[in-house]
Image (tube, helix red, strand yellow):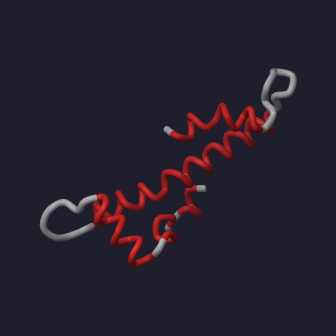
Amino acid sequence: SLRLGLYEPCKVAFGCTSPETTTFAKKFAAGSAAGALGSLAGNPFDVLKTKMMASEGKGAPSITGTAKELLKNQGIAGFYRGIDSNV
């Protein structure tokens, strides 16, 4: 998961470089930041997956076709629908 991969760089960015400088608050902030960044990166794919699963009609929809339709109808903001509940 992207969130797990971002945790260590976020810890370093928040100053958790040694046991003496690592506090619970810094680790909590680093975990929160990693989760938020992971949600921002992953949400567009979750929206596409949901739209593809909910589509009706013949054949399986393509991810590129679904993305083009979403971009045309809702713009970039369409890829981030529901982001507030994830972050």
User: x, y percentage for residue 11?
Assistant: 72, 34
The answer to which of 80 and 31 lies nearer the viewer is: 80
In the image, is 53 to the left or to the right of 25? left
Q: Quadrant of residue 26?
A: top right
Residue at 56% in and 34% down = 5
The residue under the point 81% across, 21% down is 19
Q: Is residue 41 left or right of residue 22?
A: left
Instruction: From this view, report whether residue 75 is shown above or below residue 7.
Output: below
Q: How many numbered marks does the figure carry?
A: 0
Position of residue 7 measured from the top left corner of the image (x, y, whole percent): 64, 35
Q: Is residue 1 left or right of residue 29?
A: left
Q: Nearer the viewer, residue 57 or 25?
A: 57
At 51% from the left edge and 65% from the top edge, which residue is drawn? 80
| Residue that protrudes farthest toward the right in the picture | 20
Q: Locate the C terminus and report the quarter of the image it occupies.
A: bottom right
Q: Position of residue 39 (x, y in %)?
A: 55, 52
Q: Is residue 83 above or below residue 15?
A: below
- Furthest residue toward left: 58
Q: Is residue 10 above or below residue 59?
A: above
Q: Which residue is drawn at the image coordinates 49% and 38% (left, top)? A: 1
